[in-house]
Amino acid sequence: MAQQHMVSADEAQESALSRDDIYSQRIERFTVQRNQYNRSRYRFANTTVLLFPVMAGLIIIGLLIQSVPLFVLGVLAGVGFVAVFSRQGHYDALHRRFATFVIANEEARLRLRRDWDAMPLRQPPEAPSETDYAVDLDLLGRASLQHLLNTPTTPAGQIRLQDWLLRSAERETILQRQEAARELAPMLDLRDELVVFGRLSGMTQPAYERFLHWAESDLWLSRRPALIWATRILPVLTILGFLIQLTGWVPYPVWLPLIGINVAVTYLFGKPAERIVDQVAERQAVFQPYAGVFALVEQQPFQSEALRAIQADLAADALNADEQMRRLGRIMQFGDLRLSFFFPALQAILLWNFHTLWMLEGWQRTAGKHVRAWLETLAQLEALAALGALAFDNPAWVFPELAEDHEPVLTARNLGHPLLPPDQCVGNDVTVGPPGTFLLVTGSNMSGKSTLLRAIGTNVVLAQAGAPVCASAMRLPPLALATSMRVQDSLEYGVSYFMAEVRRLKTVVDAAQATIEAGERTPLFLLDEILHGTNTSERQIAARYIIRYLIELGAIGVVSTHDLTLAASPDLQSLSQPVHFTEQFARGPEGPTMRFDYKLRPGIATSSNALKLMEIVGLPVDDSWQ
């Protein structure tokens, strides 16, 4: 049966405001830090502009007049230039980091208000095949559960979360996710770090896959030992040539022929090396942010089983994920010198790209085969953090209780629709089941019937993903959802609305039969305005037959309808648990008005409002019709 219960709008608003204040304070703090680092990075940028001509001038003059002191001063100026340039990069990164912290917390405030237009939608590039089920319950796309759980910022994290929404987990997995989400909920700093690292990477699915392809690919330079030794010996000889001329032992530029040999080696073998280094450099945004977040994850005093397993996976095979990602980042700092305008000289003297590639291949041999597992592990943490963020943002929500005895009854107290703003969400007490019964929801147009069905469905999806639910309490067995709600005809395929309804109902029946045969879950069907695409007489006969067949299979479910004669049919009266919504209609100086309280009441609806709605919008209505 169902009992009316309404969420206090003041309590909901106060709860949301408290979270809003927390995010506002974080935004203010991160803004101050962002502005501070912005000033610092500009100071170091201006210093590099001054140091470079000093360095270049001293080195060139020292070589022209064969002055060792001037040359040494130029080298020292070059060391200072590199140090200042590195420091500028450090402050650039800090500025980007705290600017992203600001954005992440601004998005959190948008989540609280369910501001779908302003809140970014992050989702994998390819939609899954379960489109009917996802559309019925608003699982994917704009203004959906996926949109509400929008914190995963890497493609792998988004795919993992989407999979959790579309595929119900087993009981033990749900309990582990609940425990992890509870632990992550108050850990705002860690959850922000997860958001920021993915945003800073700017990672796309193709970039993600290309980085993994490189990490797991065959080595190029390591198969050419002669080239490795040549690229080591030639730079040493070139530097010795400089020193010999500077000391005056030989008055001629003996380093010039060596420079020519280096250029020839680069011309003959440098293209493949340069291409590989460039490919890795293009993925720097993918791997560099991982180093810091891996270290942060490893340092956390996690207690839940799922989170401790993640930490163990990041340190498997005595190979620390954080250390290896930092090592790769350090290697690519050498590779970044390719972007400077003095790199051609550096390559001609030291054959720089070959040394960078040699270090990269050393990293591949050690860590390349582990990268995919590390990234997938972190994707799981992103998805768990999204569940934790949902719990933190909605403190009035609860983690549901999972029935151990497979009792096929779903009960919920103060159940609301999770996608509605908290101050607009009305909760109701609902019971669906046991087998042999179904919940029959009647009521007039716009009274809340469809919203109730979606509230039940979306909360079941959240519950079986391991997330908190929009309710004060909820208990459910393992369920297999099947829905027929947003049915559409198709002019392209010549499918009428009624035929589309019939096909959807066939999928519901097939899913229920398959679930019963598997014996592991209870089918839960949600049918909204069943078969209203045909005439009244046939609709009643067909609807009664389909509902009765599903009930006889052992399914439980909810059916909404305008058709009060369906509710009155003798063969369904003994099976149905009737509840209804209603409205309040009034006439005033400004014309007729209608108000809905969205409270669920026991019994069959006693009113309709189609003609009243026509009157409200200004259509002509004959009083004799009412």
Image (cartoon, rainbow, N blue to C red):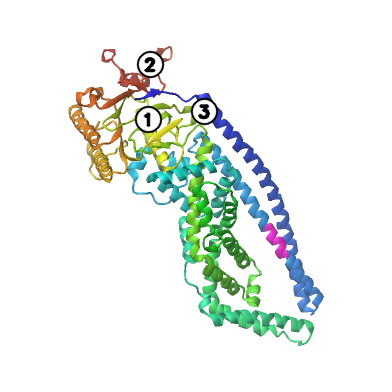
Which mark sits nearer the N-terminus, 2 or 1?
A: 1
* Residue position for label 1: 452
475 to the left or right of 75 = left
Amino acid type at circle 2 is Phe
Residue designated by label 2: 585
What percent of the width, then of the height, locates residue 136? Answer: 35, 38
- C-alpha span from label 2 to label 1: 22 Å
Of badges 3 and 2, nearer the viewer stands: 3
Is 579 situated left or right of 14 in this image? left
Local secondary structure at mark 2: strand
Circle 3 sits on which residue? 12
Q: Is residue 483 visible?
A: no
Q: Compared with residue 314, is residue 464 higher up or lower down, i.e. above or below? A: above
Q: CA distance from mark 3 to mark 1?
A: 19 Å
Q: Position of residue 124 (x, y in %)?
A: 43, 50
Q: Nearer the viewer, mark 2 or mark 1?
A: 1
